[in-house]
Amino acid sequence: MSPSPDQPPELRISEVTLRFGGVTALDRVSLTVAPGEICGLIGPNGAGKTTLFNCVTRIYRPDAGTITFGDADLTRARPHRIVRLGIARTFQNLALFPSLTVLENTLVGAHSRTPAGFTAATLGWPGTTARHRRLAAEALDILTDLGLRDDAHRPAAGLPFGTLKRVELARALAARPRLLLLDEPAGGLTHAEVADLGGLIRRLSTERGFGVLLVEHHMGMVMSISDHVVALEFGRKIADGEPAEVRNSERVVAAYLGKAS
Ligand SMILES: Nc1ncnc2c1ncn2[C@@H]1O[C@H](COP(=O)(O)OP(=O)(O)OP(=O)(O)O)[C@@H](O)[C@H]1O
């Protein structure tokens, strides 16, 4: 069945290899993320998860292999084009502006898809005000959806960590993603917050139809919300399948036990 014109494309990573000097951080890794699908990416520390994210967002260029998003070849695209293609990400360590309000931080994501950008709108450059108002209304809708409406006009600094993780998600959503890369969204959250966030990510992906590549050490979350899970160890893919299958894979169990011992 051919995809509808509005449907986001599939992310296809094929045989990607990347070396840092003598370290092979990624060794012929392949995976796909279909629209509306959550792909969990797991593996012990140093397995290559963040490096793979950085290849998709063109921070790094693989030594070999291809990464495509529909017709777009991401290994050749300039980094700024990645955002324009609708690929948004969150970071392991929060990358918010502490002195900006929650709404302003969210708008940084929205303006990433407009030509004028956030600074021009903030400075009131001609032609930017109406657009800024429209984007602000959209951002408020997102904040409401994420339970952050009451925090919209508070500065990010001083807000609880769990709230800030949601603001990061709000900012990524404001870019109207067609693919979302989440780097440890549950890191540092309480048990209840992890469960809430997992449910939220699952709902957003289904409702808005975007694919999610989810790097997460919290196994409960990965296994409960992913459609399929890919496990890496020392840059190599050691499992790819349904959550239960990957969780019970002897190689995956051994990779984690090896790390703990
Ligand atoms: N910029 C870099 N220069 C040199 N080596 C790097 C660089 N980035 C990553 N590496 C190495 O590549 C390998 C993969 O690292 P990466 O950060 O991708 O792992 P990870 O699975 O994301 O780990 P974690 O779960 O700890 O975040 C590691 O051996 C790491 O030391």
Image: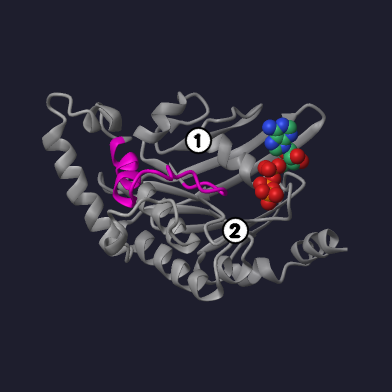
Left or right: residue 130 compared with residue 112: left
- Type of amino acid at the residue the image marks with label 2: Glu
Residue 18 visible, this orientation: no
> Which one is in front, 211 or 110?
110
Q: Residue furthest bottom?
A: 192
Residue shown at the point (29%, 49%) measured from the top left: 103
Q: Is residue 182 above or below residue 52?
A: below
Residue 17 figure quarter: top right
Q: Residue at x 57, y 55 (%)?
A: 184
Seen at 39% across and 54% down, the residue is 167
Residue 92 counted in the magenta span: yes
Dot 1 crowding, Cα within 10 Å, few <14, some 14–19, many 20+ = many
Looking at the image, how many numbered discs can be counted on the residues? 2
Q: Which residue is mark 2?
A: 216
Element on which disc 1 rests = loop
Quadrant for ligand 1? top right
Q: Is residue 127 left or right of residue 197?
A: left
The residue closer to the viewer here, 189 or 221, is: 189
Residues rendered magenta in the picture: 90-111
Q: Percent position (x, y) of residue 88?
A: 42, 43
Q: Is residue 131 left or right of residue 187?
A: left
Q: Quadrant of the C terminus?
A: bottom right
Label 2 crowding class (10 Å Cα cut-off): few <14, some 14-19, many 20+? many
Residue 155 forms part of the magenta stretch: no
Given residues 20 and 149, the one toward you in this image is 149
First in sequence, mark 1 or 2: give its number: 1
At label 1, the amino acid type is: Thr
* Tag 1 residue: 57
In this picture, residue 134 sits left or right of residue 238: left
Q: Quadrant of residue 43?
A: bottom right
Q: Is residue 17 visible?
A: yes
